[in-house]
Amino acid sequence: MEFLLHRFRNLTILVMVIVAQLLLLAYQVRNSQDVRLIRVWAVTAVTPLARLLEGLRSNTFGFLRDYLLLLDARQQNLRLKAELDRFKMENQFLKTELSTAERAQALAAFQSRMQSKTLASRIIGTGTGTNSKIVFVDRGSAAGVMRGMAVVTADGIVGKVIAAYPTASQIMLITDANFAAGVISQKNRVHGTLKGQGHSTLLVDYVQNEEKVEVGEMFFTSGDDRIFPKGLPAGVASVVRAGKNFNKEIFLTPSGFQNGLEEVLIVLEGVHQAVPDALPPQSPGVYMMPAPPPEPDAAAQPEGDRKASALQTDADRLRERYRRLGEAQGHVFGEGVPGSRPPDFNINPDAVRPPAQPAAPGPAPQTPPAKPPEAQPSRKP
Amino acid sequence: MTEFGEGLIPDAPRPARLGKFRPAALLLTPLAAILFQVYVPLFFQYLSYLEMPLLVTVYFALMRRGPVSGLFLGAGIGLVQDSLSGQPLGMFGIVKTLVGYFAASVSLRFDVDNPLIRLVLAFFFFFFHQFFYWVLASALLGQQMRFDLQQTAISGLLNAAVALPMFHVLDKLRERG
């Protein structure tokens, strides 16, 4: 052994240094279940042997219990089922409580309408590594900065604080491959998860193919991640296409880096804001009027209008208008002989009363008769 | 073997002609390289592709011609680099340890004072560094990183081009005699 170690001295030292750093790495890194990698490795190495031993033991010594002593299995099964039902109800109750608390919290934040308290800071360095998306700013824990705070510019979100030292803080940019945040689209209010990819574009994940997202649509923070206040711009959709696994592939151009990245704002106390409504697309140099006012209520409309509003097409509405014009002027379509006077199609059918029925007995009308159609200026159709 | 080739790859292992450096040079040069990588890309974004700590690791490992000292130098520079990055400690450490070891091992067989050899080795170790880092990040950290072959090759050429004059300047730090 000593001979081998002496002969391969360099290689032995190399292996020892690599293993030491691997152990250091495994001690720091946690997997998706927040368990240290070294623990995962140790458990993975040990558990197969333990499983084998336990299998032997249970098969050997548990034979009698499993196959011969099943006297109370049914009672035990019933008791466990009852417990499971109780836990399900308890779980449902707790979910309802949690949902109520979250709604109340969101409502309180919405009602407060306070501006977020921010701290201006300057970027003084970048992280090492060619693919690094980490920067350092000149404000640290002494200025009240804490890990997890959002970092924004006037144009949008930039990143979040991942470490706060006394005089400086480390910021993970939104383009980092480990970055994620909740976002919502401006126009169609589609929720998704914003992810960095290690380069200049961002990915919005977990948006189903059935959801509607348009190219050029703005995305804002949704506030779901508890890091960024709701309503901050995140980016503009540059590519939208249907993807595999039922989720769309949406790529964003981040809006926070539009004017460079020199000074940023650290959000010390974030306040959620409403996501602004989308403006209609405007063509440069073309005047567009504001949108027309909403239609009056159906109850305030006359009978004819109510009928008309229930119709769907322009042809239906035109036919209804002609019918009312004919009624107002006592004209029956399809009965006029050639050369007879046609009805006036230019009058307002609501301003003209239908002609009095000669055979109908009764008191005289209180209101003056409507102006005959001939008295109004008319044009031949 | 041609006359040119004979100058590059000697048939027998090279005699131990260690490049000696002052301790201050061994300490301050890697620190300057790391400071360069932290500070300069702020003003010149395109310089972020320069992996100065790697080039310094390669240079000292090649010149000192000791695998053990090379791996320890690489581990030290890599761990300092790790501490300034957002990644767990050990990622750059492991990769630069291997770079230091292999660079020092290679220096025993090649004439590392030859500019062409330096250019090729700088390109090769940059590519090795980026590829092994990608392997580690994918396998150990589970990161979904993209290994862009074309971009890495271009960055490698750029780093190799910078390595030539940089190594020439660093040669001035060697102790005479």
Image (cartoon, rainbow, N blue to C red):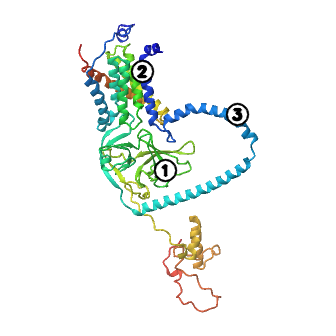
* Mark 2 Cα-neighbour bin, 10 Å: few <14, some 14–19, many ≥20: some
Task: Pinpoint the chain carrying mark 1.
Answer: A
Badge 3: residue crowd in 10 Å (few <14, some 14–19, many ≥20) = few
- Badge 1 marks a residue whose secondary structure is loop
| Residue B138 rendering spot, x and y as whole percentages | 48, 33
Say which amino acid is labelled 3: Thr
Give the residue at the far bottom of this rendering. A363
Q: Is residue A310 above or below residue A266?
A: below
Residue that mark 2 sits on: A13
x, y percentage for residue A78?
Answer: 71, 52
In terms of sequence position, does the residue under pointer 2 or pointer 1 come before the other?
Answer: 2
Mark 3 highlights which residue?
Answer: A60
Label 1: few (<14), some (14–19) or many (≥20) C-alpha neighbours in 10 Å: some
Of residues A33 and A69, the one nearer the viewer is A69
The residue where tag 1 is placed is A214
**Amino acid marked by disc 2:** Ile
Q: How far apart are labels 2 and 3 at the CA level?
A: 47 Å
Determine the secondary structure under disc 3: helix
Q: In the image, residue A25 lies at what x, y percent?
A: 44, 33
Query: What distance separates the C-alpha of mark 2 from that of mark 1?
Result: 57 Å
Q: Is residue A66 above or below residue B1?
A: below
